[in-house]
Image: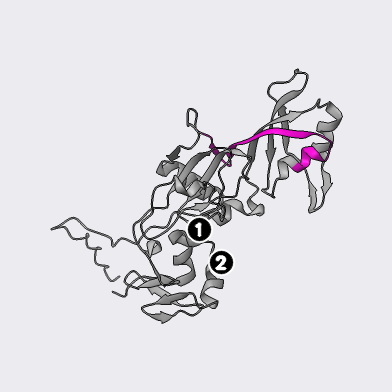
Amino acid sequence: MAAVTEKLHKVLAQAGLGSRREMEQWIVQGRVRVNGQVARLGDRVDAKARISVDGRPVLSSALSATPRRVIAYHKPLGELVTRHDPEGRRTVFQRLPKVQGGRWIAVGRLDINTGGLLLVTTDGELANRLMHPRHELERDYAVRVYGRVDEAVCQKLLAGVDLEDGRAAFESIVPVDSGRAANEWYRVRLLEGRNRLVRRLWESQGLQVSRLMRVRYGPVELPAGLREGRFEELPSAAVRQLAERVGLAETKARQPSRRPAGKRPPRRPARRRP
């Protein structure tokens, strides 16, 4: 039986190195080798292929039984969502467990002054789909606003305002701790992940965000009781639900059909001639 093969850029994406489009660019740039040879766009590989990127070996997880993994991480303020910081500041990846033959991919970013839920996965294709605007995954934030917020301001933010990179709006604004003189808490929802969008929307109305944390991404809520700097790995059912939400079915190796030993399929009765 012929060995099962898969497109190289898909294998790299499912190994957690990035999206399929990014992997195609890496191949074109000559950064990928298969069995010692520079790879070409459109190449296919099997589970025995020796794949390397920039000289580092990569496991062909797309052709193995290794399941995709997703972690819910409670990001503290002051941490960066990056792999290397020239100033030596702490990054979220320093707290995460090692991944054999792959790496963690952050689903979106939280800036240094924003805490809360950060999803990371070993599947680059899943990360890319979760971030893509066409899927319109809900992002819920708990936000403390400095200044009084009246109904007119909320209506403007729900209707949409023009920002420097286009029009944007909150999907919902729900008061959480209203009535205080200076700071009020709200739970707001976005369907996209543009840079600093929550802060910029409030700032467009002359208001300042004094505290911001993400509490939900798609169907995943920040786990209750999960302390800052800690993480929980999502169970397989939750990972499957997350993948199905963005049209990414769970891939399974084809299994040959098996028949109980010693049994043969029943014979079809012979047809009699008229």
Q: Secondary structure at mark 2?
A: helix
Mark nearer the N terminus (2 vs 1): 2
Three-letter amino acid code at the position of disc 2:
Glu
Pick the front one: 274 or 179 = 179
Vertical placement of 74 versus 193: above or below? above
x and y percentages locating residue 266 in the rendered image: 22, 59
Query: Number of marks in the image?
Result: 2
Q: What residue do we see at 46% from left, 66% from top?
A: 12
- Quarter of the image with the C terminus in it: bottom left
CB of mark 2 within 8 Å of CB of mark 1? Answer: yes
Pick the front one: 120 or 112 = 112
What residue range appears in magenta? 200-222
Specify whether residue 211 is painted magenta.
Answer: yes
Q: Name the disc covering residue 182, or none.
A: none
- Per the image, the residue denoted by label 1 is 124
- Per the image, the residue denoted by label 2 is 22
